[in-house]
Image: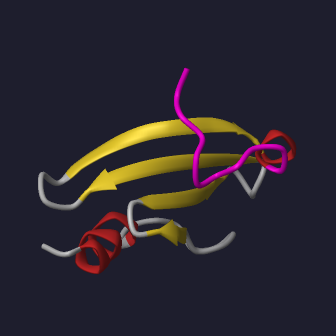
Amino acid sequence: MDDRQLFQFIVRDHDHANAPPLLVKSDRIVFNIKGNAYRLVMSVDSELAIVWIKWIGTHQDYDRINVKEVEHE
């Protein structure tokens, strides 16, 4: 499964009423949660089909991070 196929698999059942997930780079996906009040940043290893939560927080806090580099503390 390549990165694009994995991204499509992950977002297939996501509620797109607010906004579709954003593919930031080949291994980073951002989801809007609860009417865009929160953001979830995930990292994906497409070869192993593993997903890591890199960051979760408010939309306001999301505006202050570098989504391409943020790591879970």
Task: Give the side of residue 28 with respect to residue 66, left or right.
Answer: left
The residue at the point 61 percent across, 37 percent down is 56
Residue 69 left/right relative to 42:
right
Q: Is residue 33 above or below residue 47?
A: above
Q: Which residues are magenta?
A: 63-73
Q: Is residue 2 magenta?
A: no
Which quadrant does the N terminus fall into? Answer: bottom left
| Chief secondary structure of the magenta portion | loop
Residue drawn at x 46%, y 59% as measured from the top left: 28
The x and y percentages for residue 21 are: 54, 69
For image coordinates 40% across by 69% down, the residue present is 26
Locate residue 27: give its quadrant: bottom left
* Residue 44: x %, y % from top left: 32, 54
Give the x, y percent position of residue 41.
55, 48
Q: Is residue 22 left or right of residue 6?
A: right
Between residues 42 and 71, which one lies in front from this camera angle? 71
As for residue 67 lying within the magenta part, the answer is yes
Q: In this image, 8 relative to 73: left or right? A: left
